[in-house]
Image (cartoon, rainbow, N blue to C red):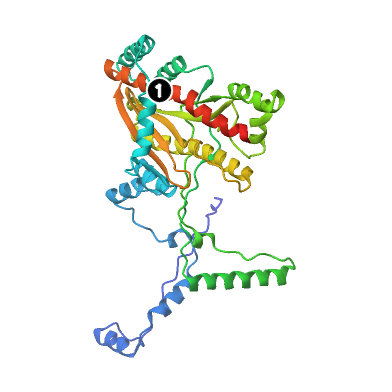
Amino acid sequence: MKRSRSRSPEPLRPKRPKIVDGTTGLTIEALFEHDRCLQPLSPYAFLDMNSQHKSPSLADVPIIPPPSTRSSQRSRSSSPSRVNDAQYRVNHLRRANIFIDDDNTTSDVWTYVEKIIGNVEFDSHLDRVSDKLWIKSKELVQKPSGEAEWTEMLHMLIDELKDQKLDIVRNRDWCEELKPPVHNPPPTIPRKRRENQTNLATHEATFESSSIGVSTSPRYNSQSVAFPLFRLKTPRPDICIGLSDKSLEADLVPKKGRNAARSFLVDLQDTANLISDPHVTPVGLRFPFLIVEAKAGATGGNLYQAQNQAAVGGSAALQILQNLRDLRENQDLGQTRSVSDIPHLVFSITTEGPIHEIWFHFRRPDEDDFYMSCIGSWRTTLKYDSQNLVRHLQAILQWGNGDFRSDVLCVLQTL
């Protein structure tokens, strides 16, 4: 006998609906009759039905078409998170009352500056130094030299010209407290909207405290009170020149004694009464009067950037002198004493490769404005310009170790 093969049961086929006799046929007349008797649905009813029977999924997220290439490029270039150099000068510096190349420089300030820079005669020593600068500059322009190479050249030049009572420091962060204050606009919230937010926050805090049993402070929507915040960059000069701590200590010994003179400026700095060393980590350089901000076109830097940085650094150096003046006024206790002997003038050098500019920064004692004006510009690949730059630089260094030191020391001895 042949064994019958077991077959797997075949899947059940769906039953076809039976056509019932007497059903109205699908005719044009029947469709017209159906449309006439059917009540129209409102569009909201369809949305309600769709939301009830539709499960949430990624397909429900609306697809936003990508922006065009031109608009996307425009939005990236105008990103508010990055401020360009022009915006920084117009917005940030002006809100800190720092003005570059402003015409408000009066004749008396210019007269004093011209007296400083015209007080040096070109001798054989300056001639040798200027030749080194000229030769080195021509060597650097033949290569894609960066900021480090140009800064090193200028550092060697200043170190050869300065007196031992002056100190020179490179690439050190300054204290943020010395930056001029920046005016920021207040939050612009309509009065009615602010009251509604306050009432809502108070209601939420009351509900939470009653339900949890813990007192909570009102919560405000931080996004509703957001406003532009303007901040100055903290100075970090490529080169900084000031008075040596050891030399000031020696000058104060005859008036205050050795022990008191040794700790005098240190105590004032540690108690935050007078920050005379601007660096975050004190390095023994007091009362800076000349800073250098170097850039190189070969690496993307320019004079505009160097000027912005020098403007903040020069204003911070002026702030140190203003703090010294305020400290003496507070100790005078209302006594009549002239404070015109405190200088309110410092200098800066901005560079872009072989191009060197010298600026002076000044501030009037009873005003909050800081001004930065250019004395001149020289290209050190030209021999005559190298000689002129060295002569101006030597004049500023002599003033810093002469009249500037004497004026600062005169005030320190009265404290």
**Residue shown at 67% from the left, 25% from the top:** 262
Q: Amino acid at mark 1?
A: Ala
The residue most toward the front is 336
Is residue 172 visible to us here?
no
Q: How many marks?
A: 1
The residue most toward the right is 213
Question: Which one is nearer the viewer's eye here, 78 or 47?
Answer: 78
Q: Is residue 192 left or right of residue 211?
A: left
Classify residue 264 by image quadrant. top right
Quick one: quadrant of the C terminus? top right
Residue that carries the numbered disc 1 in the rendered image? 395
Residue 410 location, x and y as percent? 56, 31
Is residue 24 visible to us here?
yes
- Which element type, helix, strand or loop, lies under badge 1? helix
Classify residue 246 by image quadrant. top right
Seen in the picture, residue 353 relative to 415 is either above or below; the reply is: above
Q: Is residue 53 left or right of residue 73?
A: right
Question: Which one is nearer the viewer's eye here, 373 or 17?
Answer: 373
Question: Which one is nearer the viewer's eye here, 132 or 106?
Answer: 106
Residue 357 location, x and y as percent? 34, 28
Residue 63 location, x and y as percent? 38, 58
Question: Which one is nearer the viewer's eye here, 31 or 80?
Answer: 80
